[in-house]
Image (tube, coloured by chain):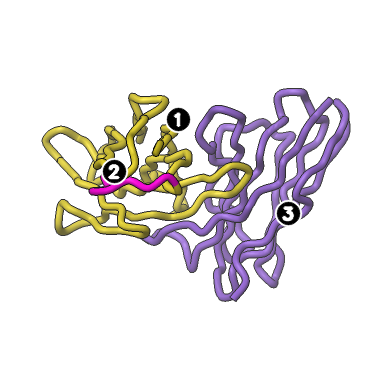
Amino acid sequence: AQSVAQPEDQVNVAEGNPLTVKCTYSVSGNPYLFWYVQYPNRGLQFLLKYITGDNLVKGSYGFEAEFNKSQTSFHLKKPSALVSDSALYFCAVRDMGLTGGGNKLTFGTGTQLKVEL
Amino acid sequence: DAGVTQSPTHLIKTRGQHVTLRCSPISGHKSVSWYQQVLGQGPQFIFQYYEKEERGRGNFPDRFSARQFPNYSSELNVNALLLGDSALYLCASSWTTGTTGELFFGEGSRLTVL
């Protein structure tokens, strides 16, 4: 079964500093990986995805993620954090094993990012 | 264009009751998925529908059911509500199924079971 792990419940960073939110995955076959962000009492917003190609994926709001096959990781990064980046971040992997060709996502438990002045 | 819309946004039910949640996908999207997000956890997959057919089902009891209509909107029904069904129910749409595209989520319906 596909799975992702987010080892940190919370990440604190000062505004202007680089941030990293960690994610590791376990899949059979090629991984299709995603990052979503959730603001309080809101739905999930898509940030970026890795399907194939370059290991460094660029996404929305200045975020990027680095895919590392040997370490089975897909860490989310941003060179300079903003207070407005404070939110809950989810890593997800697409389950390729559904019959009927479904596009189920399996999410991690989430990492709360807190950016302080 | 409007995004994924869900209704109601909040609702309170008592144990044993039934609830129906509704979702309208982004115009042109033919696939709708439902997720349950319990407080402090990541979303858990419940169902996916594409072209009115079920394309995936998560590990949820038969009390949970769903359907998709000809206009691609969808309903999630939960019978015999339990306290543990209290959660944010998220609907997501996408162009199709079996692709590598992202899902677009609505704001969710927050269900509280007393």
Q: Which mark is residue A109?
A: 1
Circle 2/circle 3 CB separation < 8 Å? no
Chain that the image shows in yellow: A
Q: Which quadrant is home to the C terminus of chain A?
A: top left
Tell me the subunit letter for badge 2. Answer: A
Q: Which quadrant is home to the N terminus of chain A?
A: top left
Q: What amino acid is found at the position of numbered circle 3 in the picture?
A: Glu
Tell me the subunit letter for badge 3. Answer: B
Give the CA separation, mark 1 to mark 3.
Answer: 26 Å
Taking A5 as reference, is A109 left or right?
right
Chain that the image shows in purple: B
Name the element at disc 1: loop
Residue A109 position within the rendered picture, expressed as x and y whole percent measured from the top left: 45, 30
User: From what the image shows, is residue A36 above or below residue A116?
Assistant: below
Circle 1/circle 3 CB separation < 8 Å? no
Same subunit under labels 2 and 3? no
- Magenta stretch encompasses residue A56: no
* Residue holding disc 2: A76
Give the CA separation, mark 2 to mark 3.
Answer: 34 Å
Q: Residue at x 76, y 55 (%)?
A: B7
Which residue range is magenta in the image? A76-83
Taking B17 as reference, is A5 left or right?
left
Sequence-wise, the earlier of marks 2 and 1 is 2
Q: Residue furthest front?
A: A117
Give the CA separation, mark 2 to mark 1.
Answer: 15 Å
* Residue holding disc 3: B75
